Amino acid sequence: MYKFIISGGGTGGHIYPAIAIADELRRQIPTAAILFVGAEGRMEMEKVPVAGYPIIGLPVMGLQRAWTWKNGLLPFKALKSLRKAAHIIKDFRPDVVVGVGGYASGPILWVAQRRKIPTLLQEQNSYAGITNKLLAKRANRICVAYDGMERFFPKEKIRLTGNPVRFAGGQASLVDPPAAASFGLSPDEPTVLVVGGSLGARTLNRMMMQALPMLAAGTVQFIWQTGKTYFAEAQTALAAIGHPKTIRAMAFIDRMDDAFAAADVVISRAGAGIISELCVAGKACIFVPSPNVAEDHQTKNAQALVEKNAALMVADADATTQVLPLALSLLQDDARLDAIRRNAALLAKPNATRDIVEEMLKLRIMNYE
């Protein structure tokens, strides 16, 4: 029997690629046993079961950047997580263990590597995360989405696969009119999607709330993912202007493929996962990189597209005054809009998930040789 562990999480940028890998693995090998390992209390503990997979949580925690007493718990939680990971490996006996990034993947990959179980790392960003960098030396394969990753990882282990996405089939599979209707919007009017990641983005939400009276007076439609934290505030702001029909606010968008299909322009943070999805969908995007990430990796992610005229970028500090005027201007410039879409599509790797699963299966064969 085929057995695989997939580990990582913390944000949608780690969780949804992990679920996409599991879905492709199940498609190729319906009888495969797939177990997820995440961090207790984090987003993956909710999203993975909804996707139909079992998950076990570890008490692992990440290092807080600002000093807090919680950092003192880190070594105790790490040891407890390693012990629990050892029991999971012993009981489940996986053929291959996959890490998709985030500190949740550290303990289970560490144990697997020391027990000579093949491991595969999936690095989504152009600047490698600390967990993957620490695990790379003993990993068997490292699947990446950007060129030049040999500055972080052993070159002979790297496979340039791209990032898994939540949908397959590319732009041709994204049918616009039904998608717009699913949000209660007209397919005949231009639409902007504003998405700040699975947890929401304060800057993008502030930008939208400040501009609501002006946006409500126009004909451009907006699909606005606020994140759970900001949803009530957004609803209050919309109620104050009579809930305009052209603005659809949601705490979370489950069908991101429909949101992409409905949108002419996307305004987004620059997480690696959504960048890959936008390229597969062939969408024009204005990126507002988060300033609150390690090594400013979102700016590096976005810059890789900007340099190829496959996206636009605005600094977080300038977002509230510059992003919406730029988006509205872009909607009026068909030639520029089409050029960005074409260039984004050229960067797409729609077979990324399949290619990663193929690497996993190669490692399984290696394990039994």
Image (tube, rainbow, N blue to C red):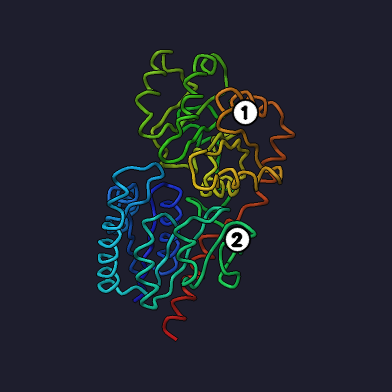
Image quarter in which the N terminus is found: bottom left
Q: Mark 2 = which residue?
A: 149
Of mark 1 and mark 2, the one earlier in the sequence is 2
Q: Residues within 10 Å of mark 2 (few under 14, many from 20)?
A: many
Q: What is the x, y in percent for residue 114? A: 37, 75
Q: Is residue 293 above or below residue 107?
A: above
On screen, residue 329 versus residue 139, left or right, reads right
The one nearer the camera, 94 or 52, is 94
Quadrant holding the C terminus: bottom left
Q: Amino acid at mark 1?
A: Ala
Q: Does residue 310 appear left or right of residue 179 in this picture?
A: right
Q: Residue furthest bottom?
A: 369
**In the picture, residue 225 is in which quadrant?**
top left
Q: Quadrant of residue 351?
A: bottom right
Q: Position of residue 150 (x, y in %)?
A: 61, 64
Q: Amino acid at mark 2?
A: Met
Front residue of 46 and 206: 206
Residue for badge 1: 327
Q: In the shown orientation, is residue 15 left or right of residue 173?
A: left
| Front residue of 288 and 185 | 288
Secondary structure beneath disc 2?
helix
